[in-house]
Amino acid sequence: MYALARELGAVAPEAFGLELASFFVASQEPITRARISIEEYGWSPIGATGYSFARSGDPVRTTTVVLDAGHGASVVSGVRDLVVLNTTASEFWGYPKDEYTTLPESEDRILATAVSARWRYRPSAVTPAPAPAPGEGATTGWDAAFAAAKAALLAAFSGTYSYSLQQTLYAMGSRVLADVPAACEVRLALPNKHHYLVDLAPFGLDNPNEVYNAGDRPYGLIEGHVLADDAPDEGLAWT
Amino acid sequence: MYALARELGAVAPEAFGLELASFFVASQEPITRARISIEEYGWSPIGATGYSFARSGDPVRTTTVVLDAGHGASVVSGVRDLVVLNTTASEFWGYPKDEYTTLPESEDRILATAVSARWRYRPSAVTPAPAPAPGEGATTGWDAAFAAAKAALLAAFSGTYSYSLQQTLYAMGSRVLADVPAACEVRLALPNKHHYLVDLAPFGLDNPNEVYNAGDRPYGLIEGHVLADDAPDEGLAWT
Amino acid sequence: MYALARELGAVAPEAFGLELASFFVASQEPITRARISIEEYGWSPIGATGYSFARSGDPVRTTTVVLDAGHGASVVSGVRDLVVLNTTASEFWGYPKDEYTTLPESEDRILATAVSARWRYRPSAVTPAPAPAPGEGATTGWDAAFAAAKAALLAAFSGTYSYSLQQTLYAMGSRVLADVPAACEVRLALPNKHHYLVDLAPFGLDNPNEVYNAGDRPYGLIEGHVLADDAPDEGLAWT
Amino acid sequence: MYALARELGAVAPEAFGLELASFFVASQEPITRARISIEEYGWSPIGATGYSFARSGDPVRTTTVVLDAGHGASVVSGVRDLVVLNTTASEFWGYPKDEYTTLPESEDRILATAVSARWRYRPSAVTPAPAPAPGEGATTGWDAAFAAAKAALLAAFSGTYSYSLQQTLYAMGSRVLADVPAACEVRLALPNKHHYLVDLAPFGLDNPNEVYNAGDRPYGLIEGHVLADDAPDEGLAWT
C-alpha cells in the first residue's frame, strides 16, 4: 500500500482504490474479488509558508471500490459527518398520528442533520476513468465529481423549504443525480438532530425561537435511496 | 441556564460564564464559589439564505470561569483539537541519549500536533470586562482576544523553524503573551503526532519524504507553561 | 416505545423488537416494512441489596428484527465488542507472498480480536417464538439461544489451535451453527489485533514472548460468513 | 519502557511507575522531576486452557506517580468508568430552590453514576513500598490496596441510603479512608446519570417505577475531596 502510494503519487482516493484492487485481483490466483474502502481528511493552508496546514472542517470524503474478476469494477463515493442546520424554513405537521404520538406539530422549526451520503457511479464512468479536463491531472474527474456532489447536497439542503426531512432527503439525492451525470444512485442517512424550543414561561420569559435544547434522543434516522430512471444494475457495488 | 441565555442573548462564552457564576454565588447563601466551563462550536454559512449553516472546522473554543466570594473572578480561555502540521522546517537531533534510546535523529521531518492551549486573563482584564471597541457589542473584547490568541498560535506554529516541539511550544505561548496583552499565562499540551517515513527499500523504491505512516504510539505529550514576567498570582484560576 | 415497554415488561430484545415491528406494520396502512435494531448492556449485582448493580463487562448484545407484510419476520442477533486473546496456540506461516509482503512468519504468536458476530435465526424459530422451557418465562428461548451462541464463540476461540484467524473464524461460526440449531447463518468480523514482540536485543535483553507492543495499524479485518447446508433463503434479514 | 517491562516482569502499575520515574530522574542530569500515568485493563480467563482470556468489565485501574528530586515520591491511584446504579434507596428533596428550579423532588429514584475516584497514598506507604505479605510477591501491597479501595467504593455506594449524590460521595470517600489505611485523601467525580420516569398517562398507563428514560443532559457533575484528619501535605501529588 505504501509502495503503491509512492508509485501513484497524489491521486484521488477512487483512483488509488481501483489500482490497489487491481493489484490484489491480478497478483494472486485465488483472489477473485477485492473491496477497498478509503477515507480522506482535508487540510487547509496556514499562512503563506506553503508547508503549514491545519486540519480543515471539511466532512470526511469516503470511497469504496469493488473489483470482481467476473463483474468488473464499481465505485461508491460519499461524505459523512457533514453537519448542517437551517434555523428556519422548516415545518412538520399533518403527519399520521396514533395514540402513542407525542411529537408536537411545528410550522417553524430548526432543521438539523449530519449527512451521510454515498453515490454510486455508473459503470461507464468507472471504466475507463472519468476523462480529465485538458491540461489537468488524472485525478480531476473524481475530484470534480466529488466537489459537484458535495455542492449539490449543500445547495439542496439550504435551498429546500422543508415540510419534512424525508422531503429534504429526496431533494438532496435528486440534486446529486441532476448535477453529477456520472452518478446513478444516491443513498442517504440523515439523523434528525432535534432542537427543542425551551419553555421559558415558568421563568416569566417568552422564547421567540431564541433558546433551544439540542437533544439527541429520541431521534429519527431518515434513510432513503434515490435512483436514476436509467440506472444500471447495482451489481456488487453495495456489498 | 436557558433563561439566562434568553436574557443575555448571543454573548461571548466568557461573558456568559461570568454572569452564570455571579448568579450562583449571589443567589444562594451557602454558595461561595462557582466554576463554569463552556465549549463553543463554530458554524459557517451555506449559500446566501442567511439561515443555513454547516458545522465549521474551527477548533473548539473553551472557557472556564471561577468566581469566588473572597478571591474574585478569574477567566481561563482556550482552544482544543486544533490539528496542525508542517511538512518541513522541522529537525530533531542532538538530544541526550542513553542505552534505551531508539528514536533516530532527523534533519527534515514532519511536525504535527493537536494543540490544546489555555490562557489565563489578567484580573484587570476580567473586572470590569474588556472594553468593547466603539460601536461594537459587549462581546467584542472576549471575541477579539480569542481571535488574536488563536491567530498567534497558528502564526507561531507555522512561522517557527523548529528544532523540537518543545521549542515550538515556547514560541506559541510567547506569541500569545505578546499579541494578547490581556493574557498573562499560557498552558499548552502538544501531543507529538509522529509521521514515520516508510522504508520502501525492500520494494526497490526510494522515498524522498513522500510516503509516511501516521503512527500514534508511542508518542510524546509535550506540556509546558509560559508565564509573563509580570503575571499576577494565579489564585483559583486553574483549580 | 416506552408504553410498549410498560406493557411487555422485561422481555428479550428479540421479543421486544418483534412486538414493536408488528405494531408499526399493523397500525399504519402505508407502512409495510419495519426494521428494529436494539442493543442490550449487562449489569452485575453489587453485594446483597438486590437493588445495586455495576455495569458488567459483558459484550453488547444486539438484535435486528425485520418485519415485512409480504416476507414475514426475520431476526438477526449478535454480540459486538467481545475482546478475546490467546497468549499462545496460534501460528501463521506458509501464506502466499509477493514482493510487497513484510509480515514475518510466526510459529507462536498472540492471537487477539474484538468479535463482532451476528447470527440469523431460521424462520421456523421466529414464527412462532422459540418455546420457553416449562416453568420459565416467555423470554427463555431468545435468551438461551443468545447464551448458547456466545458460549459457542468463546469455546471455539479458546479451543482452536489456530493457523490463521480465518481458520478461527470458521471454527467460531461452525460452532454456533452446531450448538444453536435455531441459527442457520453466522457472519463474523474479526479485526486482527496484532501484538508485536518487541525487539529488546538493542538493550542487551532477550524477549521470550514476554513483552509486546499492542499495535493497531496496519491490521487485517477478517470477515466471513458460515452458512448451514440447509439454510433457508435469507430474504430481507440482512437489509 | 519495554526493556524495563522485561526486567521487572508483571508488577503492579504503581511499582512500575516508581521504577520508571526513578530511571528518568537518576539517568539524566537536567531531569529533576518525572510524572508517570498508567492505565490497566482487566482480562478474565476463558475456559481452562490457561492461555485464553476475554477483556473483563473491570473498571480501568489508574495510577499517577510523581517523583521529584527535592520532594520525593508520591502515588495517586484510582479507578474510572465504574458505572453503578441503585434502583431504589435514593431520595432527593428539600434542596434550596429559586425561580429557575425545575427539578422535581423525589422520594424514590434511581441513583446512577460513573465513578472516577483517585486516592493519594501517604508518603509512608510509598517509601519504602508497602510490605508484601509473607510468601507473596512484591506487587501484593499495591494490588491489595487497590482491591480494598475498589471494594470500599462499591460497598459504600450500595450500602448508603442516599438523600443526595453528595452524601453518597462523602460515604464513598470516607469508606476508602477507613478501609485503606495507606490512603490519606480521596477525590471523586460523580456525574449524576439521571433516569427520568416516563410519563405514560397520555397512553392510559401507570408507571410504578418501571420505565425510565436514561437521559444524559442536563446533568450534575458532583465533585468532592475527602481528606483524612492527619493527612500529610499533598506536595506535588496532584500536579
Image: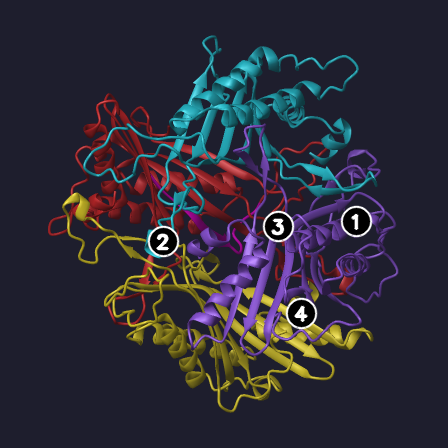
Chain colours: A red, B yellow, C cyan, D purple
Estimate how packed mark 4 is, as few (under 14), some (14 to 19) or many (20 or more) residues with alpha carbons within 10 Å: many
Q: Nearer the viewer, mark 2 or mark 3?
A: 3
Q: Nearer the viewer, mark 4 or mark 2?
A: 4
Estimate how packed mark 2 is, as few (under 14), some (14 to 19) or many (20 or more) residues with alpha carbons within 10 Å: some
Q: Earlier in the sequence, mark 1 or mark 4?
A: 4
CA gap, disc 2 to disc 3?
Answer: 37 Å
CA gap, disc 1 to disc 4?
Answer: 26 Å
Disc 4 target residue: D123
Task: Report in which chain the residue with disc 3 lies.
Answer: D
Q: Main secondary structure of the magenta part?
A: strand
Q: Is residue C37 left or right of residue C140?
A: left
Mark 2 lies on a secondary structure that is loop
Residue lying farthest bottom? B230
The quadrant in which residue C64 appears is top right
Estimate how packed mark 3 is, as few (under 14), some (14 to 19) or many (20 or more) residues with alpha carbons within 10 Å: few
- Amino acid type, mark 1: Ala
Q: Nearer the viewer, residue C154 or A13?
A: C154
Q: Which region of the structure is painted magenta?
A: A77-91
Q: Residue at x 72, y 30 (%)?
A: C4
Disc 1 target residue: D155
Residue lying farthest left? A135
Q: Are marks 3 and 1 on the same chain?
A: yes
- Amino acid type, mark 3: Gly
- Amino acid type, mark 4: Pro
Task: Report in which chain the residue with disc 4 lies.
Answer: D
Q: Nearer the viewer, residue B156 or A79?
A: B156
Estimate how packed mark 1 is, as few (under 14), some (14 to 19) or many (20 or more) residues with alpha carbons within 10 Å: some
Instruction: Give the label on residue D137, or none.
Output: 3
Q: Residue at x 76, y 20 (%)?
A: C137
- Amino acid type, mark 2: Gly
Classify C232 as above or below D223.
above
